[in-house]
Each structure stands twice: as structure tokens, then as C-alpha cells.
Image (tube, rainbow, N blue to C red):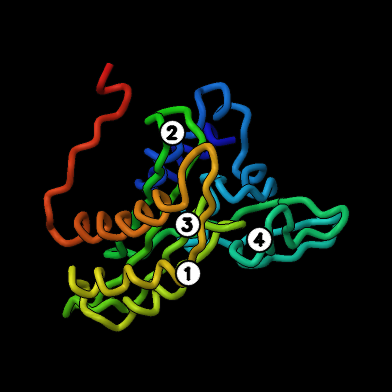
Amino acid sequence: TYTEAFSTLAKRIPALGPLFDRIGGDQVRNMGTIGGNIANGSPIGDTPPPLIALGAQLTLRRGNTRRTIPLEDFFIGYGKQDRQPGEFVEAVHVPVPAKGTKFAVYKITKRRDEDITSALGAFLLTLASDGMVTDIRIAYGGMAATPKRAFGVEKALLGNPWTEATVEQAMAEYARDFTPLTDMRASAEYRALAARNLLLRFFAETSGTKAPIQISRYEAA
């Protein structure tokens, strides 16, 4: 369950802590599972984008037969996953980011807590000593029919200096990577704008720029 996984994952990957804290309420987190969130295949599931950005693997099992695939390959299309008849999600293998790697996940909702995601972005960044981007993985939920990597944005960033100019240039690739829909949670235009600005926020928080302070509901109370 989310509750059982919280301490282990949040200790090793701190950015997952605040995300888990916003998935439903205590009752949901006590009963809902990460495996179920993945197997459900929803394009707005909260755990797939950050796990995809981290390079997670998924083990599927039927009887005594197991196979392990990259999590991002599990999602084929809307309501369609790479799961054979009789297979179930047995395990999720989550790599811990290497020391010095920057990782963040941002959830956009109408309400701060206990609300379904409108859009969610996850970012994993590795920089060289000279500030060049040597590895970047970006995944979103709520922007396509499945949780999806921003391959065009990644390509525009890879091998370039981690600067605001580079980031702003890469933001143009969002229009090629995603065609979001309008629904009751957000308009397509809002999702597109929010997705681009999440990259800008990630840059601000990883380049020494003072970011806005966030207060948890416990601190607020």
C-alpha cells in the first residue's frame, strides 16, 4: 500500500514523500497500492510518471512465469496495457537516483489535497561538472492517453548547458510531445501551459533560484 511504501521510498527518494502525502486521504493510502495504481492504466495515475522518470521496471507474473519490462513500455494506449491474460503486477523495481542527481515531481490539482490530478510532471536530471546536461528524463501524466515521456524536450536539453535560455528553447518541444485534452479538470490550454512552466520551475529549483515555500497541511494546521 501507499502507507507501507511511504517510509521506505520517501527515505531514499525524498521527493516522493510529498507526492504520496497528496494521494487521497489516510483511508485511501491505507488500502490503495502502487501496483494497483499502475495496473489500472489511468493516464492521470500519480505514481507512473515519477517511476518512469526514475527508470523503474515492472515484473508481471502468470503462474510461475515472470517477465520484467521497463515501466514506460507497459502503457500502450488509453485503457490498454502490455499485460497478457492471467498476468498480474507482481513487483515494481524502483532505482534510487545516484548521488548528485536532481529529481522532482509536481502535481497540479484544483484543490491542494485529496484531489484527482489535472497534470503531473516528473523530472530526473544529471549534470556534468561544467553544468552540461548529461542525462534527463521527463515524464507526465494528464497530458496524453497514457503516462508519457517528453522525448522532444529531453532531446533539446541533452548535451546543452543547464541554463534558462536552454530551458526556454526546449519548452517549444512540448507542442510536439503532447496534445492534451480538455475535460472537467482542466482545459487543454491550461495543461499545456502548466506542463511547460513545471520545467521552468524545476530549473529554478535546481539552479540556486529561491523557490516559493510550500507548506504541508500539517504545518498549516
Say the numbered circle drawn on residue 75. Answer: 4
Say the numbered circle drawn on residue 140. Answer: 3
| Sequence-first tag of 1 and 2 | 2
Say the numbered circle drawn on residue 177. Answer: 1
| Sequence-first tag of 3 and 4 | 4
Name the residue at the top extreme.
221
- Secondary element at image label 3: strand
Q: Write the residue at 38% across / 44% down.
A: 11
Q: Are dots 4 and 2 in contact, CB under 8 Å?
A: no
Between circles 4 and 1, the one closer to the viewer is 1
Q: Amino acid at mark 4?
A: Phe
Percent coordinates x, y for residue 132 in the rendering: 23, 79
User: How far apart are the alpha carbons under marks 4 and 1?
Assistant: 16 Å
State left or right for residue 31 relative to residue 208: right
Specify whether residue 51 is in view.
no
| Sequence-first tag of 3 and 2 | 2
- Seen from the viewer's position, the closer of residues 158 and 128 is 158
Other-residue count near label 4 (Cα within 10 Å), few / some / many at <14 / 14–19 / ≥20: many
- Secondary element at image label 1: helix
User: How far apart are the alpha carbons under marks 1 and 3?
Assistant: 10 Å
